[in-house]
Amino acid sequence: MNSLGEISVRGTTGFIILLNGKAIQTAPQVLLGQIPANSIEDIEIITAPSAKYDPDGGAGIINIKTRQGSTDGMFLVVNALWGLPSLEAYENAEKARRYGADLTLNYRSGKWDLAMGLDYRRNDVSGGRVVISSAI
């Protein structure tokens, strides 16, 4: 890794990164920033990959192996949305109500990954309405 945070293998950035043997499409810096250090079991650097691997990684392959069960558990994400009223009334009978919420529940155990999400939104549209009519 250089001072700019770029990762290179054998002097080049043309390598493939694997997570538990599966190819990752994101940048290596992003992936390494998302994995907790205590969940990494081993980092394997393959400089001369066999025919088993995709030939795109000319410089080699980095395979990051994580501990089994390190990502197991239950996760809950809750978001709320509240919108300010319109700056102009536009002569509407009522002011628009803008609010919403969403909830995501995720359970992961071994090979199972179950997720459930709920979402509610009320985004009333207020604004000027113009009726154009033409007589023929």
Image (tube, helix red, strand yellow):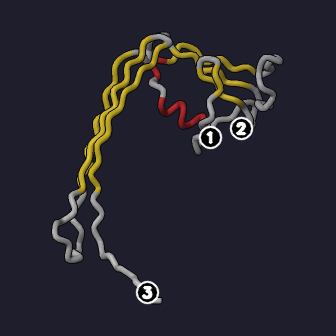
What is the distance, in whole Å, between disc 2 and disc 1 at their CAs? 8 Å
Task: Find disc 3 in the rendering and name its residue.
Answer: 134
Residue 10 in picture, x, y percent from top left: 75, 30
The residue shown at (45%, 24%) is 36
Mark 2 crowdedness (10 Å alpha carbons): few <14, some 14-19, many ≥20: some
Residue extending furthest toward the left: 94
Kindly identify which residue carries mark 2. 13
What is the residue that sits farthest to the bottom in this orientation? Answer: 136
Task: Name the residue type under label 3.
Answer: Ser
Distance of label 2 from label 3 (alpha carbons):
64 Å
Circle 1: is it few (<14), some (14-19), or many (20+) Cα within 10 Å? few
The quarter of the rendered structure image containing the N terminus is: top right
Q: Residue at x 21, y 58 (%)?
A: 97
Quarter-wise, where is residue 69 in the image?
top left
Mark 2 and 1 residues: CB-CB less than 8 Å, in contact?
yes
Looking at the picture, how far across and down is residue 54, in whole percent?
77, 26
Question: Which amino acid is tagged 2?
Answer: Thr
Front-most of residues 22 and 88? 88
